[in-house]
Amino acid sequence: MSDSLTPKYDLGLFYLSGHLEESDFSLIKSDLNENGIGLKAIDKSGRVTASIEDFTNVFSFLVNSPLAMGLVSGILASAGWESIKTVILRTFKKIRSEKYSKITRNGVESKQITFGIEIKINNDHYNFNFNGISSDEAIHEALDKIIPLLKDKQLQSNESNIVLASGLPNYIATYDEALKIWIVRGTNEIILGKIQNSKQI
């Protein structure tokens, strides 16, 4: 095992307490630190709200813009992305079948944990949603397609996509296992669709 490096980048992790143990966090930190990446873990307990849960995840790894640019540009060695994929897959495998208790106006509800990766790069904020992906192999496959997708997006014309609701990702991505591609939709498009559907009820 190589000596740990002083972290030059940070990977965020938003989580709910009670689902990961201290040993899990220690292992994540160890794997990332070997490639110069630190971990910033933030407990979201008590802060999951119904109004935004369609656009965010209960568990999210957050790749901020400096780390994302390092990965896309190749400045950060491929081993860095491999270590990130390793900790993401291991964490998702542990929590993907678990549930959490959510307090609503009707009482306490048991809900399935949602999980994904949020990536901020330049002015864009993506939420790659991994719910429903059927196997470890498919999750590996989906992870491998994220960086190429971001590279393509950076080469395309930079259109403004300001989100109607501040603080949300401006793109939501879901993985199509049959087509083996990420389907990326603008959050505004999703919000407007929900508004239209509510008017038809």
Image (cartoon, rainbow, N blue to C red):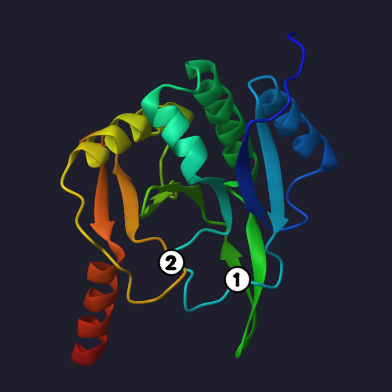
Q: Which residue is drawn at 33% across and 49% down?
A: 174
3 versus 80 height, above or below: above
Question: What label sits on residue 57 in the rendered view?
Answer: none
Q: Which residue is drawn at 70% across and 73% down?
A: 46
- Residue 89: x and y in percent read 55, 33
Q: Which residue is drawn at 42% across and 35% down?
A: 69
Please tell me which residue lies in front, 5 or 30. Answer: 5
- Residue 113: x and y in percent read 57, 57
Q: Which amino acid does label 1 sit on?
A: Val
Is 121 left, or right, of 58 in this rendering? left
Q: Which residue is the site of mark 2?
A: 168
Q: Dot 2 lies on which element?
A: loop
Question: What label sits on residue 48 in the rendered view?
Answer: 1
Please tell me which residue lies in front, 104 or 80. Answer: 80
110 versus 138 height, above or below: below
Q: Which residue is drawn at 33% across and 50% down?
A: 173
Q: In the rendered structure, which disc, 1 or 2, sits on the residue that comes first in sequence?
A: 1
- Residue 101: x and y in percent read 67, 69
